[in-house]
Image (cartoon, rainbow, N blue to C red):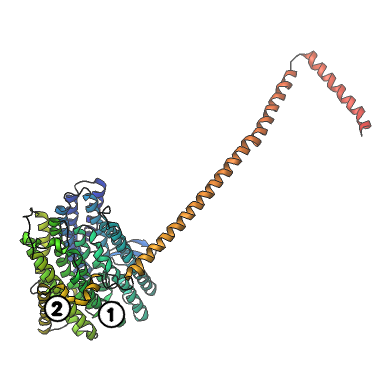
Amino acid sequence: MIFLAFTILSPLLAGLTILVLRRASEALGLAGAALGLVGALGLLATAGSGDVQAVLTGLPDMPLRLIATPLTAVLALLVATVAGFVLTYATGYMAKDPEKPRFFGTLLLFVTAMQGLVLAGDWIMLLAAWEMIGFASYLLIGFWYRRDGVASAATRAFLYTRSADLGLYLGAFLLIGVAGTSEISATLATTGTPALIAGLLLLVAAMGKSAQVPLQDWLQRAMAGPTPVSALLHSATLVAAGAILLIRVAPMLPGGALLAIGIVGGVTAVVAGLIALAERDLKRLLAASTSSQYGLMLVAVGAGAPVAALLHLIAHAAIKSSLFLGAGVFQHDRDSTTMDAVAGAGRARPGIFAGFAIAALALAGIPPLAGFFSKDAIIAAALTSPSAAWLLPLTLAGTVLTGAYMGRALRVLWHGDPGAKPGTIPLMATGMAGLVALAVVLGATFGPLEQMLNAEMPEFGLAVPALGLAAALSGLALGWLVPVTGLLRGLLPWAERGFVVAGGMDALMVRPALAIAAGCERLERRLYDGVLALGRASLSLGQSARRADRDAIDAAIFGLVDRTVMLGARARRLQSGFIHRELAITTIGIAVIIVALFAAPYLV
């Protein structure tokens, strides 16, 4: 229980403290990340001997749950580790930014939301965390919102992912309705048609978050945010959420849903790989690469081997964050990440280039780096799958393309004018070095990890490593030696446009959503104007009533009062106290009464 609290509350409290105090953001950020890492390590140590669970007050009969199983504890440790190194890098990258308290505070809240998502034990908690990471990512992508194109990039990312999130809501509510509980582990016992429908709906949600075809475009445009955001977003947080969702629900997925997941992932691995190969910007290349790699993870899930997807998720987190942090250093030196601008930047910083190259080779699948083992697991899963005829060619094509676009990136960074010798960047280099080291050594942990998860990997001999290595080496050679125009030929214009057809998802999703939003705004303004008009009419009526009350009713009442007072004053003068005057008045009164009595019969 204490480790659950440390894992989630440490970054949360640190982030809130930074946003309130607006000072010491680097120290507080690193302290929050470090304590969160301690909590995640404790969870992994205790989860091996049994699940750790915390039950919190929630909806009636649907309490909120946090649960650390071996799987969720591994994911929590992955998030905490990558976040710690990225925050170390960010202390150097954001050192001169006047808004760094806002950056560090929001980034830590982002990490908190992701930890809540991976440790969620019920669908309500997962939905809440899912919403939080979407909102936090919007704030981080749009961090430099005053710059041209940044606000629109953040809005695009929000619209794409939020539209696909409808699949998560419908899928989760369907599972809750069928199982009669919101506990995730209990709903995974769902079978038959409800399981198929829920699986396809959850696939839609994963396609949005993990930028799968045709929803991949937003991720490349999200490069408008600071580099540490890109590194964290692409490796272990927002984009990972879709793959994590499918890995967690894999035991429930029937054959039809698995086939759909595998096909979507395989097509994305190829299409996004072609887009990455055609890119003219280093960070956008890495973004398209992220879509492609998560496509390979979906292939593993679709092939019935979610553990292979998990291994590649872990390896990719270290690899891709290393690549983005390296790209951020080159951007720091050249004020741009276009291919022309960063040409030769690697020769100016041989240490950073070496780390970038190691990560690139790991992503391509070169032994003994982590990516080699995870790629082999995916190839083996595709080869032994009932859908091997579809999944294996797409997986191998995606692997070749991975080598090709990483080979091209390495060539661009090495060939060209190195320029003047840049200054030192110790904190940025330290953060990157830690992640590169993980990209090298993580493969050695995959065997024990499989045993801890009690997962069975597909059996394969030497054929699969040989096939994977051949695909990786051929891709690297093509990317290094052959110009992109020669590789893609007629596909190049299509790849540069992101294979957009009939306006793409902008025409099908973004523009309609913005049009609906504009229509809603116009309706709201009309309602607002109508309410104001009604208010003005009511105010005018009230003022008229006030005048009538003041000039008529109040005047009549005050007049009656004045006359009563006047009459009383006159009557008071009759009360003189002299007996002779009182007797005279009495006599006159009696006379008037007698006259009236005698005159009354004649008046009738």
What's the amino acid at mark 2?
A: Asp
Badge 2 vs badge 1, beta-carbon distance below 8 Å: no
Instruction: Mark yes or no: residue 488 visible.
Output: yes
Of marks 2 and 1, which one's residue comes earlier in the chain? 1
What's the amino acid at mark 1?
A: Leu
In this image, 290 relative to 151: left or right?
left
User: Looking at the rendering, which quadrant does residue 458 occupy?
Assistant: bottom left
Give coordinates of residue 466: x percent, y percent: 10, 82
Label 1's element?
helix
Give coordinates of residue 585: x percent, y percent: 81, 18
User: Quick one: label 2, few (<14), some, or many (20+) residues within 10 Å?
Assistant: many
Residue shown at 81%/16% (left/top)? 583
Position of 273 relative to 128 (above/below): below
Separation of residues labelled 2 and 1 (CA atoms): 20 Å
Q: Which residue is mark 2?
A: 376
- Of 175 and 158, nearer the camera is 158
Q: Which residue is mark 1?
A: 258
